[in-house]
Image (cartoon, rainbow, N blue to C red):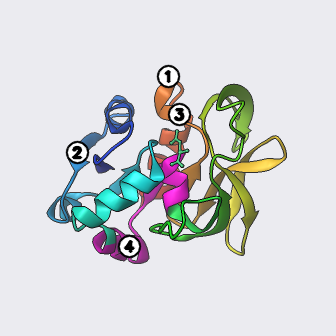
């Protein structure tokens, strides 16, 4: 499978390494043309406001929305989760998202004092050590959204159809369970 990783800002290199280690071919996405040759897309962690602005500057905003609407499998971690949310709170004024998942995501939800932490949690029944860095959480899910992990009483991994989002960064650990879930359960058979 050819997996595109949006490579405008953030930890796209780690997602490329994770994807390749799962036996797929990762490619960097910087143009709308790049989007045409992929079977799936990953939106990395980083700074959601910067990534969305750069996507407009690189003429990728509308093409990515179109791909999402057409059913391209997309996985977003941390900032990537914010980018997949239909609604956000505590965003920058006027902050846009690509959207696609019927949820409200609170940006920087785990607070300023505890910007980063690690926690053991269950992801779809699998025990996982999760890394959170100025992470969002899911404030509210709408119809059609499946919660795959929770931490501190909030959803931190969700799926809606072909879209997967996590508050945490599996690309920064060696446990590939989330990437494998994306490739095996969402991308396969499409
Ligand atoms: N706080 C960042 C944002 O709002 C997300 C942090 C991350 O991706 N590690 O985009």
Density class for disc 4 (Cα within 10 Å; few <14, some 14-19, many ≥20) is: some
Percent position (x, y) of residue 83? 49, 59
Instruction: Determine whether the residue tagged by mark 2 lies in a helix, strand or loop.
Output: strand
Label 1 secondary element: loop
Rounded to the nearest whole Å, what is the CA distance between mark 2 and mark 4?
A: 19 Å
- Whether residue 77 can be seen here: no
- Residues at discs 2 and 4 in contact (Cβ within 8 Å): no
Which element type, helix, strand or loop, lies under badge 3?
A: helix
Residue indicated by mark 1: 174
User: In what element is the residue under mark 4?
Assistant: helix
Sequence-first tag of 1 and 2: 2
Q: Residue at point 43% right, 58% down?
A: 74
Q: Are marks 2 and 3 in contact (CB under 8 Å)?
A: no
Q: Indicate which label's residue lies in the foreground, 4 or 1.
A: 4
Q: Is mark 4 within 8 Å of ligand 1?
A: no
**Is 171 located above or below residue 161 in the figure?**
above
Q: Earlier in the sequence, mark 2 or mark 3?
A: 2
For disc 1, does the CB lie below 8 Å from ligand 1? no
Residue 66 image offset from top left, x and y in percent: 34, 76
| Mark sitting on residue 27 | 2
Direction from residue 149 to residue 172 in the image, left or right? left
Residue bearing mark 3: 170
């Amino acid at each position: 499978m050819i997996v595109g990783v949006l490579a405008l800002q953030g930890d796209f290199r780690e997602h490329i390494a994770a994807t390749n280690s799962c036996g797929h071919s990762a490619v960097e996405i910087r143009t709308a043309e790049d989007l045409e040759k992929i079977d799936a897309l990953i939106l990395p962690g980083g700074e959601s406001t910067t990534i969305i602005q750069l996507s407009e500057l690189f003429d990728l905003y509308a093409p990515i929305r179109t791909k999402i609407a057409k059913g391209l499998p997309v996985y977003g971690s941390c900032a990537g989760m914010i980018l997949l949310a239909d609604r956000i709170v505590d965003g920058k004024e006027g902050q846009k998202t690509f959207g696609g998942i019927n949820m409200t995501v609170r940006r920087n939800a785990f607070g300023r004092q505890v910007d980063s932490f690690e926690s053991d949690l269950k992801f779809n029944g699998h025990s996982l050590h999760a890394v959170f860095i100025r992470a969002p959480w899911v404030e509210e899910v709408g119809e059609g959204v499946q919660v795959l992990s929770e931490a501190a009483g909030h959803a931190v991994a969700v799926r809606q159809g072909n879209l997967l989002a996590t508050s945490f960064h599996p690309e920064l650990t060696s446990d590939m369970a989330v990437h494998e879930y994306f490739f095996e359960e969402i991308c396969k058979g499409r």
